[in-house]
Amino acid sequence: MATYAEMREIYDDIRGDFRYDHELNGCLNCGICTATCPSAQFYDYSPREIVQLLWTENVEQVYDAMQEKIWACAQCMTCAARCPFKNSPGGLVMIMREVAIKHGMQSAKDVLRPFGRVMLKLITTGNQLSPDMIQPDHFPDWGPNIQKVEGNLKTLRKAIPMRTLQTTDTAWEVSLKTSVEMYTIWEMTGVLNSLETMDENLFDVIEDFIDEKREEYDEWLEEQEGKGD
Amino acid sequence: MSDTVLVVGAGPTGLSAAAAASSVGKKVVLVEKEAILGGAPIISGYAKLVPSGEWAKDAIGRMVARVENDSGIAIHKSSRVVKLDGEAGNFTATLSNGTTVNCGAVILGTGFTHFDSINKPEWGFGTFEDVLTTTQMEQMVASGKIACPSDGRVPERVAILLCVGSRDRQIGREWCSKICCTVSTNLAMEIKELSPTTDVFIYYMDIRTFGLYEDKFYWKSQEEFKTKFVKARIAEVTRAPDGRLLVKGEDTLVKRPIVIPFDIVVHAIGMDPNEENPEIAKVFGVGLEKHGFLDRGEQYTNSFSSMRRGVYVGGSALGPEDIDTSISHGLAMAMRAVGEMNGLVQKAA
């Protein structure tokens, strides 16, 4: 259990986010956000509750909501479209999630763990999903439609009349230069730091991968210089 | 110096101002754009008024008759003022029917426009026949029979949604329309009176039955007419397969989303600025405030002044207003107009 000082620090981080004042103007307690919220239909989650906790500076309950509730939001932002005060409860949840990650909260780790594979693919290639990840066992919700992507993947992909889409381990061919630029973005925007806080093992794997790609890129650059002479 | 007061608009404000100015001996010219006098309560067919409980056609009807029977008041129906030249004490107004009026002061009782519920499409107005506005529901009450417009059945349950077109930044209406809470509780009682098997639910953010309306309307509607109040703003109105309306909201007191079937859904529509205010402001040389209502000058010692000397503005042209207060505004503006005209005459003598 966190101390009050720790909870206060987490709250202050949320409050201090530059988006905060834009997403929260006050609250009329009208409930239209919860009424329209798809997640509220199925989970113990209410966007109005989140807004109220933040607006009334209920530090302990804000911390409590970050254990489970904020992870039920689907980030559809219907609440923001409907709020008569032009608040964005979904936007506030986004800030709370980022702060939860920054502070290495266990709830964030638990929620993100199943996404390790997707994270690896996303950070290393910029693709969330590749054709070779789509296996019947992983996508029961597709039902019989999954058969459409079964069979010889390589042949199926070759049938796409666009060369950059004829890949199986990425959704499209990612150029070396683009990858390296993307790594710089991950680094400068703090994504890699967040990842390190959340999952050290995954971070190590990804960093090795990034180092390798950067070396490859440097070699390629040298090669180009050689050609120019 | 002219001894005539020009009154624009023949609703409660204008009717009150015209009768008052005439009663102290001024000549009055009353201009109304519609073919009949009475303003919104008559044109939109309101039922019983708050707080008197008198039928609008009777109460406002008396105000109309008083003005029509007053030989000191010249009435121009189906007319507008298209031009106003001159200054306080000596204005020249040109009417759309070609008449020219020389007048010493101008009183604007140009009123408001009902919010058009089409601007909140997710609440079903214009999509489902059984979604109505308070104005339409008042007309139904005035007709004496409560029935679903779709098939004529007697509704088991009626929902009234408050703050439709009020207190809503999403559609640029940041004001409280002031009267809808009281009007809705009144309407709930009228519905129950005409149709005792119908239960009425009111969905609210806050209840603002101000002043003495608390017990006479808010409490009475619960204690004597069993009106149910649910603290929820509605997210959307849809239709169930059986044709009934589904109202989706959050009961904020029990903190859970709810979907409840209803037979009729009523929008408690707010008061918009008169849609012609930009034109009115131009013709009379007065200003608009930030919501689009007519702007007022200093209120404490220059009460009901507009942004142009000699032109007074009051009633729901200034902002959402109830009928009783609008009538008082009319009286006050007549006092201001007459006082200023007499003062100018004395100064000239």
Image: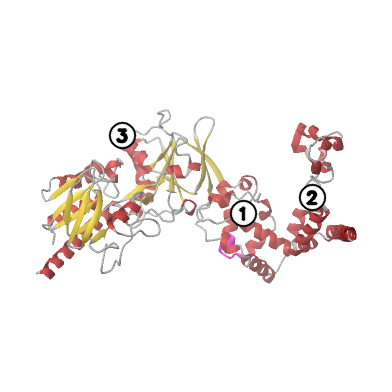
Q: x, y (%) of residue B36?
A: 23, 41
Numbered label attached to residue A118: 2
Q: x, y (%) of residue A116?
A: 81, 52
Task: Give the foreground label among 3 and 2.
Answer: 2
- Residue B37 to residue A227: above or below: above
Q: Residue tagged by mark 3?
A: B144
Q: Are marks 3 and 2 on the same chain?
A: no
Q: Residue tagged by mark 1?
A: A90
Disc 3 on helix, strand or loop?
A: loop
For marks 1 and 3, give the CA distance: 47 Å
Crowding around mark 2 (Cα neighbors within 10 Å: few <14, some 14 to 19, many 20+) is some
The quarter of the image holding the N terminus of chain B is bottom left
Question: Would residue A128 be visible to someone looking at this image?
Answer: yes
Q: Nearer the viewer, residue A222 or A211?
A: A222
**Magenta span has A86?**
no
Residue at 37% from the left image edge and 43% from the top image edge: B134
Q: Amino acid at mark 2?
A: Val
Disc 2 on helix, strand or loop?
A: helix
Q: Nearer the viewer, residue A113 or A82?
A: A82
Q: x, y (%) of residue B283?
A: 29, 54
Residue at 83% from the left image edge and 39% from the top image edge: A135
Disc 1 on helix, strand or loop?
A: helix
- Residue A53 to residue A136: above or below: below
Q: Are marks 1 and 3 on the same chain?
A: no
Q: Is residue A222 left or right of residue B111?
A: right
Magenta residues? A53-59
Numbered label attached to residue B292: none
Q: x, y (%) of residue A173?
A: 81, 47
Q: The residue marked by circle 3 belongs to what chain?
A: B
Spot the residue most to the bottom. A5
